[in-house]
């Protein structure tokens, strides 16, 4: 597995609305669990105007983890203008808690092969994730298909349980029923999709970048983003393109424990099983834990443990290592 000896993990952010707190905490928890942090690179893709702020965050990250003998490389990439999201029909943006996904950063993950031209594989993490294990095992997962991802939780209210106990999976029909989608797909030469297939969540994925380069997936997915009018960001498009979970390597549920509730701290918490066995916690709803940390803005991010403990207090035992 020589070409997989060095691990690549990618994020994208605009550093808006306190998202820097989520990104920084995700990077810290990722690094703390790496057995060989020196054999990894963390890539962050962001707008050019945010580069100075991100460099300050990287300095904070390094000071927080100064006790570790080695740290991953950090590589910053300037975001490229792949799609003009302002042209999409605002009526087609999905449920209220998903409409915020319609922004340029969401569509970065379908072009990672362009940002990382020499990498064979990459782990994509949304910036609202918290890592509880060494991601090397995920990076080395056996892949015959171009994507590895976990199922999308969609029960409402959200009560995620292990697959063998409860199956609140979303069917692909949820996206195929969108206005004109099937007709537009047929007119553009896409084969019919099975509406009974399950939907996967694109917030935690492993991508075989060699396949993405050789088979030109990005252009086809962009076409489907236009067909779906950016419904739920790229979530509808990538699922329709890969025919839901039929076209991906299905990851164990522990790799992407999601919480979609509007009010995380006033609603039913995750079951204990999910907390103790989770490998990655994904705060995928509109309400984020770091938004409950008082009035900490980007200027309040300090380079000491107090910042992280303040954020992790909000996570409560979700952040237990």
Image (cartoon, rainbow, N blue to C red):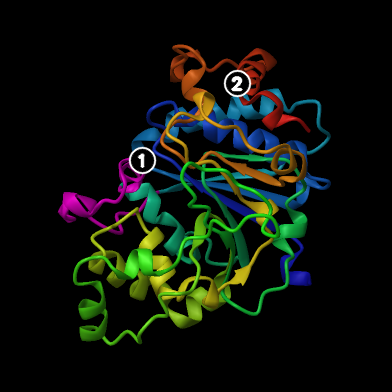
Residue that mark 1 sits on = 97
SS class, disc 2: helix
Task: Report the number of discs.
Answer: 2
Residue 6: image quadrant is bottom right
Q: Residue 278: where, in percent of width, then height?
A: 71, 45
Q: Is residue 180 left or right of residue 42?
A: left
**Coordinates of residue 77 in the picture (x, y in percent):** 46, 48
**Region in magenta:** 79-102
Q: Which residue is mark 2?
A: 314
Q: Residue 313: x and y, percent?
A: 65, 18
Q: Image quadrant of residue 131?
A: top right
Instruction: Find residue 44 and report its horizontal and vertical position in percent.
Output: 51, 45
Residue 97 visible, this angle: yes
Q: Residue at the spot x=52%, y=16% of the render?
A: 293
Q: Residue at x 56, y 60 (%)?
A: 151
For image coordinates 34% across by 54% down, the residue present is 233
Nearer to me, 135 or 73? 135
* Residue 56 seen in the current view: no
Q: Quadrant of the N terminus?
A: bottom right
SS class of the residue under badge 1? helix
Is residue 100 left or right of 200 when viewed as pictured? left
Which of the image's four quarters has the C terminus? top right
In the rendering, which numbered label is found on residue 5? none
Give neighbour class at mark 1: few <14, some 14-19, many 20+ (Cα, 10 Å).
some
């Amino acid at each position: 597995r020589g070409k997989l000896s060095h691990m690549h993990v990618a994020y994208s952010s605009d550093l808006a609305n306190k998202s820097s707190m989520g990104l920084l905490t995700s990077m810290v928890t990722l690094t703390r669990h790496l057995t060989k942090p020196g054999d990894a690179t963390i890539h962050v893709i962001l707008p050019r105007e945010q580069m100075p702020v991100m460099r300050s965050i990287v300095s904070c990250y390094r000071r927080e983890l100064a006790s570790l003998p080695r740290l991953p490389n950090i590589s910053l990439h300037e975001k490229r203008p792949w799609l003009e999201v302002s042209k999409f029909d605002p009526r087609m943006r999905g449920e209220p808690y998903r409409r915020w996904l319609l922004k340029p950063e969401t569509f970065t993950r379908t072009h990672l092969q362009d940002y990382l031209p020499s990498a064979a594989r990459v782990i994509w993490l949304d910036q609202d994730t918290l890592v509880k294990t060494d991601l090397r095992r995920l990076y080395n997962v056996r892949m015959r298909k171009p994507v590895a991802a976990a199922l999308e939780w969609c029960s409402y209210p959200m009560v995620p349980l292990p697959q063998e106990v409860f199956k609140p999976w979303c069917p692909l029909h949820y996206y195929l029923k969108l206005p004109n989608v099937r007709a537009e797909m047929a007119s553009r030469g896409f084969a019919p999709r099975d509406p009974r297939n399950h939907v996967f969540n694109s917030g935690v994925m492993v991508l075989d970048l060699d396949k993405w380069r050789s088979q030109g997936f990005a252009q086809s997915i962009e076409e489907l983003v236009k067909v779906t009018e950016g419904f739920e960001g790229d979530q509808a498009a990538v699922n329709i393109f890969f025919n839901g979970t039929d076209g991906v390597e299905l990851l164990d549920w522990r790799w992407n424990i999601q919480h979609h509730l509007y009010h995380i701290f006033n609603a039913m918490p995750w079951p204990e099983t999910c907390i103790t066995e989770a490998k990655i916690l994904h705060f995928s709803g509109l309400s984020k834990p770091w938004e409950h940390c008082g009035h900490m803005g980007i200027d309040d991010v300090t380079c000491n443990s107090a910042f992280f403990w303040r954020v992790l207090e909000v996570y409560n035992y979700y952040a237990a290592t």
